[in-house]
Image (cartoon, rainbow, N blue to C red):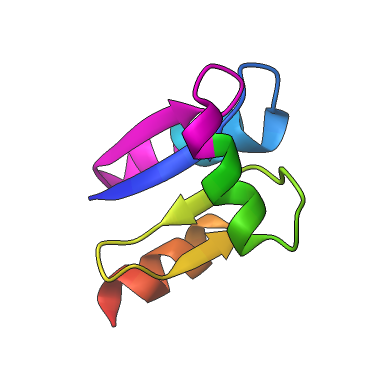
């Protein structure tokens, strides 16, 4: 299970969500425009930028704008 920080208008986010759906990867989506604390977290791991998608893994590591191959690799580690 991963957490994906997103916005409603982010095309990259929608693409990654549909790819994770197809691959059977469980995830929770948090809209950084509706959750100021989530926006702060995203900025803290992206050099002050609100870059989405930012994916948070169970081990506390993050990836910014990953593709599905990168997500699957990280989950497989």
Residue 53 position within the rendered picture, expressed as x and y whole percent measured from the top left: 60, 44
Residue 69 position within the rendered picture, expressed as x and y whole percent measured from the top left: 50, 65
Residue 17 as seen in the image, left or right of residue 50: left
Q: Nearer the viewer, residue 30 or 48?
A: 48
Q: Which residue is drawn at 51% across and 68% down?
A: 70
Q: Which residue is drawn at 67% across and 38% down?
A: 12
**Membership of 20 in magenta stretch:** yes
Residue 52 occupies which quadrant of the picture? Answer: top right
Q: Is residue 57 visible?
A: yes
Number of numbered labels in the structure image: 0
Residue 74 position within the rendered picture, expressed as x and y whole percent measured from the top left: 38, 73
Q: Which of 26 and 38 is in front in this view?
A: 38
Q: Residue at x 53, y 49 (%)?
A: 41
Residue 30 as seen in the image, left or right of residue 11: left
Q: Which residue lies furthest to the bottom in this view?
A: 77
Look at the picture and state if 72 lies above or below 14. Answer: below
Residue 62 as seen in the image, left or right of residue 15: left
Q: Nearer the viewer, residue 49 or 37?
A: 37
Q: Residue at x 60, y 62 (%)?
A: 45
Residue 51 position within the rendered picture, expressed as x and y whole percent measured from the top left: 71, 46
Residue stretch rendered in magenta on the structure: 19-38
Q: In which quarter of the image is the C terminus?
A: bottom left
Q: Can residue 65 be seen in this view?
A: no
**Membership of 25 in magenta stretch:** yes
Look at the picture and state if 5 lies above or below 42. Answer: above
Residue 17 as seen in the image, left or right of residue 77: right
Q: Which of 11 and 38 is in front in this view?
A: 38
């Amino acid at each position: 299970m991963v957490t994906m920080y997103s916005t409603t208008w982010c095309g990259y986010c929608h693409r990654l969500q549909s790819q994770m759906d197809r691959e059977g990867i469980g995830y929770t989506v948090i809209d950084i425009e509706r959750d100021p604390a989530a926006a702060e977290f995203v900025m803290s791991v992206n050099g002050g930028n609100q870059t989405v998608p930012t994916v948070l893994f169970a081990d506390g590591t993050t990836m910014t704008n990953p593709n599905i191959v990168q997500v699957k690799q990280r989950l497989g580690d």
